[in-house]
Amino acid sequence: MEAFFVSTGIVALAEIGDKTQLLAFLLAAKFRRPLPIVLAIFVATIANHAFAAAIGTWITTMLGPEVLRWVLGVSFILMAGWTLIPDKLDEDDTKLAKYGVFMTTLIAFFLAEMGDKTQVATVALAAQFHSFVWVVAGTTFGMMLANAPAVYFGDKIADRMPVKIVHRIAAAIFAILGVATLLGAGARFGV
């Protein structure tokens, strides 16, 4: 369950102000049909994060514990820095409207999430915890915690959310995970 809770918290915090959350706000404003948008975000996230967790799990079979510890520790620290960089929404992420609400959201969200902070975090978390199912469940739940309210209440909460503070908290958590991993905190997980 630790993998689930850590994955949920990290992704929920990292997603605040992220490109995919900006996309969720935009899609909600454009289509004004929250249910198919939220369902498509859910499906896209499961597919994307299952792929990322599979890579993270595979990495653990390719690297020895000492190398993996360093790779993960440095990756978490780099994620801390990346989290502090504000995201921008690409114009290409919003040009799919001809496919309808669900498919547009599914395609746009899946593509926007490729190489995104939360996908990279999912790779690292799966490698850290050796728990494909709990990491995917946690990261997906974290994405939904951040994006479902954005879709349903975006216009009411967008201006009230302290994005810089949330990013700093997420960066601090990534940094702590990185340092703890480098110091051997993941030893019980084989890292």
Image (cartoon, helix red, strand yellow):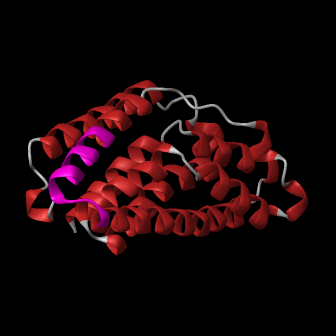
Q: Which residues are magenta?
A: 62-75
- Where residue 186 sits, quadrant-wise, is bottom left
Q: State whether residue 14 appears in this view.
A: yes
Q: Is residue 68 above or below residue 188?
A: above
Q: Residue most toward the right? A: 98
Q: Is residue 173 above or below residue 96?
A: above
Kindly report the secondary structure that dominates the magenta region of the rendered protein. helix
Of residues 148 and 115, the one drawn nearer to the viewer in this rendering: 115
Residue 153: image location, x then y, percent? 60, 47
Q: Is residue 120 above or below residue 135?
A: above
Find out whether residue 179 is within the magenta segment. no
Q: State whether residue 4 appears in this view.
A: no
Residue at 60% x, 46% y is 20
Tell how many labels. Answer: 0
Find out whether residue 65 is within the magenta segment. yes
Question: Can you say which quadrant of the picture contains the C terminus?
Answer: bottom left
- Where residue 26 sits, quadrant-wise, is top right
Q: Residue most toward the bottom? A: 133
- Judged left or right of residue 187, residue 75 is right
Residue 54: image location, x then y, percent? 42, 69
Residue 100: image location, x then y, percent? 85, 64
Residue at 35% x, 34% y is 78
Residue at 79% x, 42% y is 92
- Judged left or right of residue 89, residue 169 is left
Q: Is residue 113 above or below residue 19?
A: below
Residue 107: image location, x then y, percent? 72, 60
Of residues 53 and 171, the one drawn nearer to the viewer in this rendering: 53
Question: Can you say which quadrant of the picture contains the N terminus?
Answer: bottom left
Residue at 58% x, 51% y is 113
